Image (tube, rainbow, N blue to C red):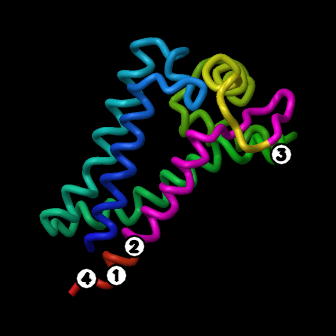
Amino acid sequence: MQTALTAQIILLTYHQFTTWCDLYPFNGVRHYSRSEQFAEAGTNAVLMSLAPVGFAFHLTPLMRYGVFYYFILFAIELLIWWVPYLFIPLGRWRLVYNRLLAFATSSFGPGDTLDRWIAVHQRLHADTISLLPRRPGRPTPNLEHSILHAWTLLTAIFTLSAFLSRA
C-alpha cells in the first residue's frame, strides 16, 4: 500500500514540477502559454490527486478510481506520444485515431487532429532532449515524457497490486 501511495505522489509531483518549472532543454514549458500551463497543471492536479487521497485514507471508491485511472492515463500517453512516433495511422484508422486523439488532448477543432498535435509538439517539444531518434513530421517522445510514461505504468502496476492485496 505504501509503495502505491509513494508512486502516486511521485507521479503527481513530477508532473506538476515539469509543468510549472522551466527545465529547458529537458522540457518545453518555456513555450507554453500561461493558460496552457494552468489547464495542464490544474486538470492533472485534480485527476492525479484523487487516488492518493483514496489510498491514504482507505477510501475504496477513490482507490478503485486509481486502479482504472492510471491504466487509462498510460493508454492516453501511448495514444498521444507513441502511436504517431511509431506509425502514422492511415485511411479508416486515421479517422478512428483522430477521434481518440481529440478526446485524449481535448482538441476538438476543425481539421485533422494529428496534424494539430504535430504542430503543437513542434512548438512545445521539438527542441527538447530525446533519447530517441527524431522522425521528421512526427512527434518524438522527449526525455521528460518518456520518464513520465514509465512512471505512469509503474504507478498503475503498483496501484493495482496494492488494491488487490489489501486486507
Residue drawn 38% across the image and 34% down it = 17
Q: Residues within 10 Å of mark 4 (few under 14, many from 20)?
A: few
The quarter of the picture where residue 38 lies is: top left
Side (left or right) of 115 relative to 1? right
**Disc 2 from disc 4: Cα separation:** 10 Å
**Disc 3 from disc 1: Cα separation:** 35 Å
For numbered disc 1, what is the local secondary structure? helix
Q: Position of residue 53 (x, y in %)?
A: 19, 56
**Residue labelled with disc 4:** 166
Disc 1 to disc 4: CB gap under 8 Å: yes
Residue type at numbered disc 2: Leu
Residue type at numbered disc 3: Phe
For numbered disc 4, what is the local secondary structure? loop
Q: Is residue 85 above or below residue 1?
A: above
**Residue labelled with disc 3:** 87
Stretch of the chain drawn in magenta:
133-160
**Disc 3 from disc 2: Cα separation:** 30 Å
Residue drawn 78% across the image and 39% down it = 94
Q: Position of residue 8 (x, y in %)?
A: 34, 57
Q: Position of residue 123 (x, y in %)?
A: 65, 17
For numbered disc 3, what is the local secondary structure? loop
Could you say which is closer to the camera, residue 72 or residue 6? Answer: 6
For numbered disc 2, what is the local secondary structure? helix
**Residue labelled with disc 1:** 164
The quarter of the picture where residue 104 lies is: top right
Residue drawn 33% across the image and 76% down it = 162
Disc 2 to disc 4: CB gap under 8 Å: no
Residue drawn 47% across the image and 12% down it = 33
N-term mark: 2 or 4: 2
